[in-house]
Image: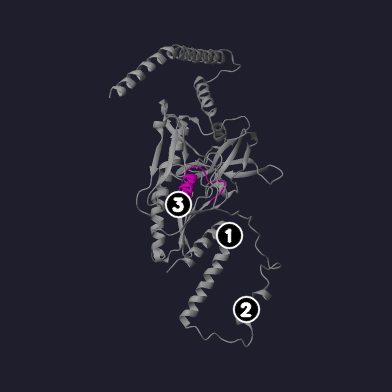
């Protein structure tokens, strides 16, 4: 006991000595830092007043301050920014799933505006804008040197009005113009359908409606197939999904997990770190899942893909995702504006960050360019090689099948032909469906 007390006292004494020796310089350093910051603020005030008094044209003081604030935030990373009242209102509309515009998610790279993804069914999607495209001009005016908010502002306009954007695309020699008619963007967060015995859930964004849409659509489609015993598995299509609300990404991941960590976020301070865990209950009832991703899958999409991949709950198919592994917090400000600030990085259950790296698929499958439809002069297949034993004159009949068995085989052949057609329309999706069909074929009955 005496040794313990002495050790404690000794520790206190050493601490006191160290504090006496170090505190002075530390306080002096902090004082110098504070002085330097105040000097910089004085410099800012001086420059602000000189601009107001001496700039060649009269300036709007409010816009000048907003530009300074936005410059400070955008210097941190591509995702931090100041949102004036109008932009903050637009952002709130987007999380509810309805807003006006072109329907593209953009970021900034090397001073140019880069398309993260065109959203399903929007004017930009219909006009053929692709993930990875660079937008260099809007109506002939260059975007180089503008902030991302300024560039986005140039692309806004009344519903029904035309905008011409100049696009640079990898693999294309020259920039080209694309005409788009602005429209009200109404996003259906999740569209669900059956492909044979596979339930396909196309998730286009993560807004307030994503999980409710997914749960309702999944249950309805399973019911249409006659119950879970008639389902081979699920395809979660996250291609060209730019992300959205972290809470929705967690809920979608949890929909297919019984337990375990979904994602963790780690901020600057240890106390700001958070872990989100799954709760019991798997909407898929253990049936296999394939997640489809590509270069347009970002942020919340990558959280879902990474969580299901790490837990070996899903096979991830497609191409490498975008690689946005940071979390932005939107903080309301005075005058109804807001500040979007990067406050944390997120990590998948295995502890990996996908920042700037993306999620790598378990099976890399490129989406080939669509082939033109065959013409009458160039038939798609040669009929000579389409003949079978049954087409030969005098061939023997099959006496081992009942009429019901024969009809079932014909139905299966028709389903296989339908699957082949899907490969022409969407090769990556057809690949995912084939995986689930193969897993169902070898599953113990």
Which residue is labeled 2 in the image? Answer: 388
Q: Indicate whether residue 296 is drawn in magenta.
A: yes
> Residue at (71%, 43%) from the top-left corner?
174
Residue 188 in sight: no
| Cα distance between the residues tagged 3 and 1 | 20 Å
Q: Is residue 178 above or below residue 318?
A: above
Q: Nearer the viewer, residue 255 or 104?
A: 255
Pick whichever of labels 1 and 2 is earlier in the sequence: 2
The quadrant of the picture occupied by the C terminus is bottom left
- Crowding at mark 2 (Cα within 10 Å: few <14, some 14-19, many 20+): few
Pinpoint residue 296: horizontal percent, then vertical percent.
55, 46
Q: Is residue 152 left or right of residue 341?
A: right
Query: Splitting the image into 4 quarters, where does residue 330 fall?
Result: top left
Instruction: Give the class, few, some or many, for how many residues have Cα within 10 Å of label 1's Cα (few <14, many ≥20).
Output: some
Q: CA distance from mark 1 to mark 2?
A: 27 Å
Q: Nearer the viewer, residue 442 or 180?
A: 442
What residue is pinned by disc 3? 190
Q: Secondary structure at mark 2?
A: loop
- Quadrant of residue 379 within the rendered picture: bottom right
Query: Where 24 sits versus 400, above or below?
Result: above
Q: Secondary structure at mark 3?
A: strand
Does the CB distance between marks 3 and 2 fall below 8 Å?
Answer: no
The segment highlighted magenta reads: 293-310
* Numbered badge on residue 425: 1
Between discs 3 and 2, the one toward the N terminus: 3
Q: On screen, 383 above or below 290?
A: below
- Dot 1: element: helix
């Amino acid at each position: 006991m005496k040794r313990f007390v002495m050790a404690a006292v000794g520790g206190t004494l050493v601490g006191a000595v160290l504090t006496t020796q170090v505190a002075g310089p530390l306080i002096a350093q902090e004082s110098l830092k504070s002085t330097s910051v105040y000097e910089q603020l004085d410099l800012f005030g001086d420059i602000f007043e000189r601009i107001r008094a001496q700039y060649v044209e009269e300036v709007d003081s409010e816009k000048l301050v907003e530009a300074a604030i936005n410059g400070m935030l955008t210097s941190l990373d591509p995702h931090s920014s100041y949102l004036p009242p109008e932009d903050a209102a637009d952002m709130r509309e987007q999380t509810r799933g309805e807003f006006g515009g072109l329907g593209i998610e953009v970021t900034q790279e090397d001073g140019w505006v880069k398309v993260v993804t065109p959203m399903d069914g929007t004017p930009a999607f219909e006009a053929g804008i692709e993930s990875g495209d660079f937008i260099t001009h809007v109506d002939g005016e260059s975007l180089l040197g503008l902030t991302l908010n300024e560039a986005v502002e140039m692309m806004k306009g009344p519903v029904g009005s035309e905008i011409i954007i100049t696009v640079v695309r990898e693999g294309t020699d020259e920039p080209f113009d694309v005409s788009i008619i602005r429209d009200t963007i109404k996003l259906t967060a999740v569209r669900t359908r059956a492909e044979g015995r596979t339930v396909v859930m196309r998730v286009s964004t993560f807004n307030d409606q994503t999980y409710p849409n997914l749960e309702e659509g999944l249950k309805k489609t399973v019911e249409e197939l006659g119950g879970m015993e008639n389902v081979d598995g699920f395809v979660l299509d996250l291609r060209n999904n730019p992300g959205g609300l972290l809470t929705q990404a967690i809920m979608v991941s949890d929909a297919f997990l019984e337990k375990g960590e979904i994602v963790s976020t780690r901020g600057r301070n240890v106390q700001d770190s958070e872990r989100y865990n799954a709760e019991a209950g798997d909407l898929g009832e253990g049936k296999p899942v394939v997640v489809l991703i590509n270069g347009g899958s970002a942020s919340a999409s990558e959280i879902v893909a990474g969580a299901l991949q790490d837990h070996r709950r899903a096979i991830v198919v497609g191409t490498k995702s975008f690689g946005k592994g940071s979390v932005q917090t939107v903080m309301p400000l005075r005058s109804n504006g807001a500040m979007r600030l990067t406050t944390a990085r997120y990590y998948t259950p295995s502890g990996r960050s996908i920042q700037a790296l993306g999620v790598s698929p378990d099976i890399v499958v490129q989406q080939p360019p669509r082939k033109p439809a065959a013409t009458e002069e160039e038939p798609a297949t040669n009929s000579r090689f389409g003949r079978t034993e049954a087409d030969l004159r005098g061939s023997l009949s099959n006496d081992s099948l009942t009429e019901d068995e024969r009809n079932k085989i014909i139905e299966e052949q028709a389903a296989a032909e339908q699957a082949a057609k899907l490969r022409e329309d969407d090769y990556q999706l057809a690949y995912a469906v084939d995986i689930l069909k193969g897993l169902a074929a070898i599953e113990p009955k």
